[in-house]
Image (spheres, rainbow, N blue to C red):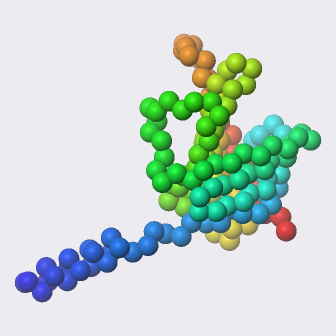
Amino acid sequence: MLSLVLASLTLSLNVLQSPPASRPDFSGPWTMDRSRSQSAESATLEIKQSATEIIIVTTSGGQTSTRTYPVEVSPHSASETISAGHTHASWDGTKLVTEAVTDIKGQTVSYRQLRFLNASGTEMTVETITIVQHGYGIKDGKNYSTTKDVYVKTK
């Protein structure tokens, strides 16, 4: 009986000490597949990924923007207030979560994107929720939008 308890304890310790699942690599150039995407404009992305930050260069409508997301160990809680200008990234299993808060014409706007790859790593799906923080509620109105876009890795 004692050997069964020791074997269970050893197995439990080995499981607790095993390394976390490897993170997928989103690095590289990506082109939106318009036929499977919901965003209003087509876009291309260039993603640079390291253990400490994610850099995403977006080109859309003839304009290019760069956003850097420091990788945080744990995501912010849903009730936490995040100020304009803040960006961060975290992991939800193998999904990359990027969040940003910005100010557009006096309105605070929050973006949360969930990125995940297909099994071969050649397609990336990006689910985005955009929330306009206007400080009041509208009955039956919504202050957010959601989109789902599919990108294909380019060479």
- Left or right position of 15 against 137: left
Label total for image: 0
Q: Residue at x 82, y 55 (%)?
A: 31
Q: Quadrant of residue 148?
A: top right
Q: Give 129 or 28, whichever is nearer the viewer.
A: 28
Q: Residue furthest right?
A: 62
Residue 141 sits above or below residue 125 on the image: above
Q: Residue at x 20, y 83 (%)?
A: 7
Q: Residue at x 48, y 46 (%)?
A: 75
Q: Residue at x 61, y 37 (%)?
A: 86
Q: Quadrant of residue 23?
A: bottom right
Q: Position of residue 111 (x, y in %)?
A: 64, 37
Residue 69 sits above or below residue 94 on the image: above
Q: Position of residue 1 (x, y in %)?
A: 7, 84
Residue 12 sits above or below residue 106 on the image: below
Q: Position of residue 2 (x, y in %)?
A: 8, 83
Q: Residue furthest left?
A: 1
Residue 73 sits above or below residue 50 on the image: above
Q: Give 21 or 138, whichever is nearer the viewer.
A: 21
Q: Position of residue 52 (x, y in %)?
A: 59, 58
- Left or right position of 155 against 138: right
Q: Is residue 147 visible?
A: yes
Q: Is residue 118 visible?
A: no
Which image quarter is the C terminus in? bottom right
- Left or right position of 40 against 126: right
Q: Give 152 or 51, whichever is nearer the viewer.
A: 51
